[in-house]
Image: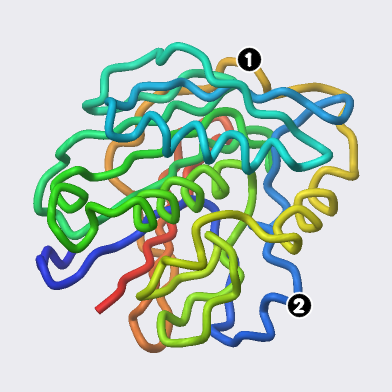
């Protein structure tokens, strides 16, 4: 994997092919139908707080933003893991910050899949190696990245992946200027309704899956023509797997 300080990547799991056109905001940006299994709406998803003081308000903002959805509520609870390596906890999302190093990525999200399409646990990490620099140490950048990575753990994909397009007013939009892309927009909330309209007969909230940490990204399964994105698959056995979607920005 390229390791250049002139690049950062945002990693998220479970990707579908995404067009880098502004019109994407008018279409679906579900991550291939992957979702938390539950038997009723709104469902309550716990978010483990493993972040330090610089991120407390940012995480609180993200939780309030996504809880505005009519189909889910996020509840902040005490963290259940160490920030390194930030292992997942079954049935919830763990959020961590640490200086993960000069490895090219600014933030990432990971989702474990069980039963074909069901999210069983998730992790969001933000990399203080970059957020402690003048460029990224701003409220706007912190809000955008935290909001986007937690959004991925709910089953959302990006609305737009072209950094040079006009901002769509959502944290699910890649941009070089985060000022107006710090929170979800109405299309994100509408997409969550679409994703979670179907109810399940069982729930993955609180269920145990195989393994709490992904060892690497697994095998490369696809990449875009411009090499701006790549998808990897890591099989965990027993029908469980992790898909890692890597987006590169120059």
Task: Give the residue pinned by disc 2.
Answer: 26
**Residue 202 x, y percent position in the rendering:** 82, 22
For image coordinates 64% across by 28% down, the residue present is: 74
Quarter of the image where one finds residue 128: top left
Q: Nearer the viewer, residue 35 or 192?
A: 192
- Tell me the mark number nearer the camera, choosing from 2 and 1: 2
Please count the marks in the image.
2
Would you name the residue on which mark 1 appears? Answer: 206
Residue 95 percent coordinates (x, y): 41, 30
Using the image, determine if residue 197 lies above or below residue 250: above
Quadrant of the snapshot with the N terminus: bottom left
Q: Is residue 71 above or below residue 129?
A: above
Which residue is at 35% across, 24% downward?
87
Question: Is 68 positioned to the left or the right of 48 in the image?
Answer: right
The scheme the figure's colours follow is rainbow
Query: In the figure, residue 201 lies in which quadrant?
Result: top right
Pointer 1 local density, CA inside 10 Å: few below 14, some 14–19, many at least 20: some
- Which residue is painted at 68% across and 41% down in the image? 116
Q: Relative to 222, does residue 197 appear above or below in the rendering?
A: above
Query: Is 142 left or right of 25, judged from the image as shown?
Result: left
Q: Secondary structure at mark 1?
A: loop
Mark earlier in primary sequence (2, 1): 2
Decide if residue 111 is on the left or right side of residue 23.
left
Q: In the rendered image, which quarter contains the C terminus? A: bottom left
The Cα–Cα distance between marks 2 and 1, rounded to whole angstroms, is 34 Å
Residue 34, position as x, y percentages in the image? 68, 47
Tell which of 171 and 248 is nearer to you: 171
Question: Residue 227 location in percent, x, y?
Answer: 33, 81
Q: Residue, x 12% and y 63% (percent of image)?
A: 3
């Amino acid at each position: 994997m390229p390791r250049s300080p002139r690049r950062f990547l945002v990693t998220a799991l479970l990707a579908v092919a995404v067009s880098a056109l502004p019109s994407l905001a008018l279409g679906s940006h579900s991550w291939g139908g992957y979702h938390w299994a539950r038997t009723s709406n709104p469902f309550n998803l716990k978010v483990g707080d493993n972040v330090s003081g610089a991120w407390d308000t940012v995480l609180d903002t993200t939780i309030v933003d996504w809880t505005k959805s009519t189909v889910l509520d996020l509840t902040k609870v005490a963290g259940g893991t160490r920030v390194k390596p930030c292992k997942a906890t079954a049935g919830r999302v763990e959020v961590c910050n640490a200086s993960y190093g000069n490895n090219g990525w600014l933030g990432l999200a990971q989702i474990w899949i069980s039963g074909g399409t069901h999210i069983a646990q998730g992790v969001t990490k933000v990399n203080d190696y970059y957020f402690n620099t003048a460029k990224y140490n701003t409220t706007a950048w912190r809000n955008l990245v935290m909001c986007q990575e937690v959004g991925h753990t709910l089953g959302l994909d990006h609305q737009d992946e072209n950094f040079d397009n006009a901002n769509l007013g959502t944290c699910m939009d890649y941009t070089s200027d985060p000022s107006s892309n710090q929170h979800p927009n109405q299309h994100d909330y509408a997409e969550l309704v679409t994703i979670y309209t179907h109810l399940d007969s069982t729930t993955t909230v609180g269920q145990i899956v195989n393994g709490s940490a992904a060892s690497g990204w697994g095998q490369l399964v696809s990449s875009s023509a411009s090499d701006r994105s790549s998808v990897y698959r890591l099989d965990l056995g027993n029908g469980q797997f992790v898909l890692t979607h890597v987006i590169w920005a120059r």
